[in-house]
Image (spheres, grey):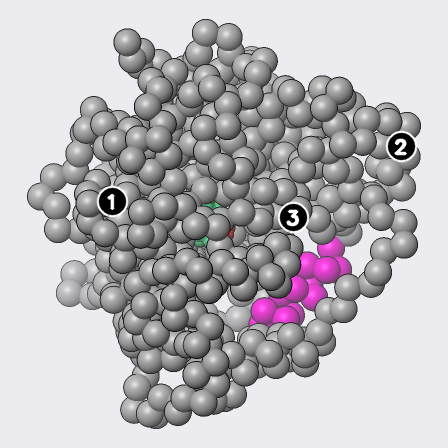
Amino acid sequence: MLRRTNALATASSLRFRGPSSLSVQCLIPSTRSRGLASEAATNNSPRYAVLGSGITGLATAYFITQQIPRAKVTVFEAKDRIGGWLASKRVEVKDGTILFEGGPRTLRPAQNGVLAARLIQELDLGKDAIFTQNSSPAAINRYLYYPDRLVRMPHPSFGVWENFRTLMSEPVFATAIWSGLKEFFKEPRSAKITDESIASFFSRRLSREMVDRILSGVIHGIYAGDVEQLSAKSLFPKLYRDEVTQTSIIKGMLMSATEGLEMPKREGDFLAEMKAFAWDPLLKATLKDTSVFTFRDGMGMLSDALARKLWASENVEFKTSTPVKSLAPTENKTGIDITTFTNAEAQRFDHIVSCLSPDHLNALAPPTTTIAPETPSVTVMTVNLYFREPNLHPAGFGYLIPRATPFEQNPERALGVVFDTAYAPSFMDTDSATWHTADMDVLRAQREAGRMINVNDFGWYNFPEKPVVQDTVPNRGTKLTVMLGGHWWNDWPAYPDEKEGLAMARSILKRHLNITQEPEAFQVNLQKDCIPQYTVGHEARLMKAHNELWKSYKGRLRVAGSWIQGVGVNDCLRSAYDVVKGLRDGRDGTGLEQIGRDEYVRLKPVRRVQETDSA
Ligand SMILES: C=Cc1c2[nH]c(c1C)Cc1[nH]c(c(CCC(=O)O)c1C)Cc1[nH]c(c(C)c1CCC(=O)O)Cc1[nH]c(c(C)c1C=C)C2
């Protein structure tokens, strides 16, 4: 008999006890706002408002406190809780608790991810982090479900012969080699085409089959979106540019490998700036070999830690349960008056950063003004399941379901399945009897030499003393998440309820993985409008929005968030970082000023130095 196990609380509220260490849920009371130190103290300090307390809002407030220490910051949040859609929850099972993620579950440390990696150090999260290694099955084994089975995608570590065999024998890759060879000789697009769908671009350059059988699956896994609608220019800017500048995307890739990666100058500057950060050598070494990382109590620990830091600051005040009603520029446009639904009296700020969705922001602008671009979004249902039995799926990250998968194989319209077990070590991994290297002295010496410690494909920053795990059951089970909906559900008149969602997830698992067991715990989350869709023309709309914002608010209102330059948590952090840097440097801007105005540089190719003393 299936037993519904109730979520206990957010993962972190289990962890924190007492007033000195409250979780975000109880940290910010729903009806009370924590005031700034004193009115007098704010007199000469610039006043900043941050709208929204999701990960972008929290990061924006945090970066303001770091970069502009004199600033007084007020964070407005319509809901009675903060933290957005980082939804980590624990559920009880008979011998422990299992951590489920309703939203994002891991972070990559590369590119924009360097900011999250820095936060590990700045917020002292290293002791709670779990690093999955580049060499682990979670990093290497990615599957596509086509036409009626799981197919492992090629990876350099499998060797030339194995990859060639897969490419030649699996229908999913039927046209891949030939399409790649032909691409080299295709004419670049006409100058008249300023943007087009991902489907159109890659069908032209490669093949329709590759779009339908491979690329649409990858796009499901990132945007839960439709290749026919999404913009090639916004989501594949380098390849879109390479078609014109190099005459071929394959040639562009070869150039990157031999002569170094070409990237916008501001990206190069950003990476150089991050490199100059005073990294803890052990963390740096650990990150170098890390594919993804997460935390003991899940991703919610990141927003918790940010909120905790902000709450402790005298310069920050939170106003929860306070929906903003309007943003009126002052007469000379040197400030903005905010009114809220709870207080008709206007509060004046020098600068406002909106971390709201475009629709929410537009609702606050003066009547007849549209400041943010129309940006559709999709709804995703995540169904987390925990089974007592281990190894119910092949080792790996999970699988994606492309649009070409026959309907009878996916009538539920699932987007993919994540094997959460792959990045969540169990107590068995902390038992030295199962380690690849069990010699404690060797491990300690490595750690003291500032080197990565690799045990059973995981790195714990504080290994070997106190390794951390997410699930507190003694033995490894199987934890996975079925992802449903996205663009497939755009026209559905109503979304499935929890019972239907669970039934759909189980039916997928039975058909694809032959899992017929009852889950011991589950959780169904409907994340409404959670992923913005950068549809064709997105960049042009952002550029127009920049002009509108500038015209109306002359740089006093700026924007950050997942609708601008990437939908992931890392992109949100980057967007927050950039907007605050612009404010700190007194640069004119709106948060959108960089869109479509990139200058490019080519970085030197990175040559891996042969390590003589491998860790
Ligand atoms: C929870 C639903 C999400 C889907 N996409 C995203 C979320 C949060 C955003 C996203 N996912 C990935 C990236 C690329 C950057 C990266 O970290 O690799 C972005 C911006 C990749 C990704 N996709 C899935 C996983 C486990 C990851 C790694 C990072 C992460 O935790 O999100 C699985 C997955 N995500 C979605 C679907 C439909 C799916 C299916 C297997 C939608």
Q: Magenta stretch?
A: 265-277
Instruction: Give the residue displayed 54% in from the left and 80% down from the top.
Output: 252
Instruction: Give the residue displayed 77% in from the left and 47% down from the top.
Output: 285
Q: Nearer the viewer, residue 99 or 394?
A: 394
Is the C-beta separation of discs 1 and 2 under 8 Å?
no
- Whether 357 is among the magenta residues is no
> Helix, strand or loop at disc 2?
helix
The three-letter code of the residue at mark 2 reads: Val
Q: Nearer the viewer, residue 540 or 343?
A: 540
Magenta-colored segment: predominant secondary structure: helix
Residue of label 2: 442
Discs 1/3, front: 1
- Whether 267 is among the magenta residues is yes
Mark 1 and mark 3: Cα distance apart in space? 32 Å
Report x, y in % for residue 1.
28, 9
Is residue 489 visible in the rendered image? The answer is yes
Crowd class of label 3 (few under 14; some 14 to 19; many from 20; radius 10 Å): some
Residue of label 1: 409
Closer to the chain start, of discs 1 and 3, is 3
**Rendered position, 443 above or below 216:** above
The three-letter code of the residue at mark 1 reads: Gln
**Rendered position, 5 above or below 64:** above
